Amino acid sequence: MIRARLPLVVAAVVAAGLSQARAQEQPITSPQDAQCREEARNRVFSAPNPKGLSLYNLGSEIYFACMRRLGADTRRPSRRQ
């Protein structure tokens, strides 16, 4: 009986994780935004992390440092509910 439910539980967990990750992705708003997202994706695993941040927070730091360096607007977009 448990074996019959296991695939359904796994599928539900995977679907929930994918929908949550998709909700965090905001539309690209400028060429600088696209460039800094790319830089953050490329550097998140190789950048030093002395603060012990999660990969998401480290990527955010890389992204916002890039945006400041390029002189772009670094305000976070408001989340719509």
Image: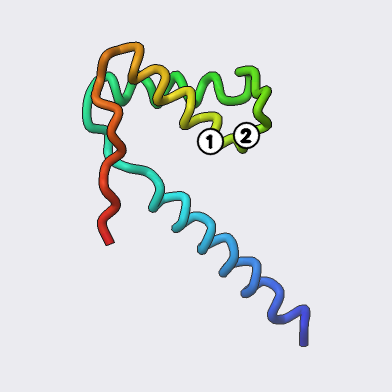
What type is the residue that disc 1 sits on? Asn
28 and 72: which is toward the camera: 72
Q: How is the image coloured?
A: rainbow
Q: Is residue 80 left or right of residue 61?
A: left
Q: Amino acid at mark 2?
A: Leu
Could you tell me which residue is drawn at 52 percent across and 20 percent down?
A: 42
The location of residue 48, given as percent across then percent down, is 64, 18
> Where is residue 40 shown, x and y percent of the image?
47, 24
Residue at disc 2, secondary structure = loop
Check disc 2: other Cα within 10 Å, few if <14, some if 14-19, many if 20+: few
Image height of 32 relative to 18, above or below: above
Check whether the beta carbons of the residues at disc 2 and disc 1 lie within 8 A of each other.
yes
In front here: 73 or 26?
Answer: 73
- Is residue 63 rendered to the left or right of residue 57? left
Q: Which image quadrant: the N terminus?
A: bottom right
Taking depth in this image into account, of 66 and 4 the one nearest to the observer is 66
Q: Is residue 11 above or below residue 32?
A: below
**From what the image shows, is residue 55 above or below residue 10?**
above
In x, y percent, where is residue 19?
Answer: 44, 58
The residue at 42%/19% (across/down) is: 65
Residue position for label 2: 53
Numbered tag placed on residue 47 in the rendering: none
Q: Residue at x 22, y 32 (%)?
A: 29
Who's the residue at 25% across and 56% down the image? 80
Q: Which residue is mark 1?
A: 57
Instruction: Give the x, y percent position of residue 50.
Output: 68, 23
Q: Secondary structure at mark 1?
A: helix
Q: Is residue 46 above or below residue 15?
A: above
